Amino acid sequence: MTMEEKIIATLRKLPPQQQQTMLDFAEFLAEKYVVKEPRKSLLGALQPLNISISKEEIDEARREMWANFPREQFYDKDAK
């Protein structure tokens, strides 16, 4: 008798509620041990878009983003 046949024979002896519990556990094990394909890195995912951003463009975007930041609210004039 194969392992599969033994499992099925044992499963048939159980009441429906325990059969459902066994099914849930078998699905859990199947999900746990499935070999998942590794995710692509963000750089790898965006590579086909052929986006090229220079250091100067990044610096300019930062200057624009922080231009209106209210620094005086966070600046301690008494600190040295």
Image (cartoon, grey):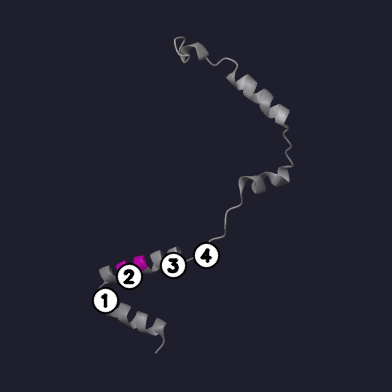
- Horizontal and vertical percent position of residue 42: 62, 45
State the count of labels: 4
Location of mark 2 (residue): 22
Q: Give amino acid for label 3.
A: Ala
- Crowd band around label 1 with a 10 angstrom C-alpha radius: few (<14), some (14–19), many (20+): few
3D distance between C-alphas at marks 4 and 2: 22 Å
Precedes in sequence: disc 4 or disc 3:
3
Figure check: 72 above or below 47: above
3D distance between C-alphas at marks 3 and 2: 12 Å
Decide whether residue 21 is among the magenta residues: yes
* Element class at badge 3: helix
Q: Which mark is residue 14?
A: 1
Q: Give amino acid for label 4.
A: Val
Of circles 1 and 2, the one toward us is 2
Image marks 3 and 2: residues in contact by CB distance under 8 Å: no
Of circles 3 and 2, the one toward us is 3
- Crowd band around label 4 with a 10 angstrom C-alpha radius: few (<14), some (14–19), many (20+): few
Q: Start and end of the magenta stretch?
A: 20-25
Precedes in sequence: disc 1 or disc 2:
1
Precedes in sequence: disc 3 or disc 2:
2
Left/right placement of residue 79 relative to residue 58 reads: left
Q: Which mark is residue 35?
A: 4
Of circles 4 and 2, the one toward us is 4
Image marks 1 and 3: residues in contact by CB distance under 8 Å: no
Left/right placement of residue 15 relative to residue 69 reads: left
3D distance between C-alphas at marks 1 and 2: 9 Å
Q: Which mark is residue 30?
A: 3
Precedes in sequence: disc 4 or disc 2:
2
Figure check: 13 above or below 38: below
* Element class at badge 2: helix
- Crowd band around label 3 with a 10 angstrom C-alpha radius: few (<14), some (14–19), many (20+): few
Q: Give amino acid for label 1.
A: Leu
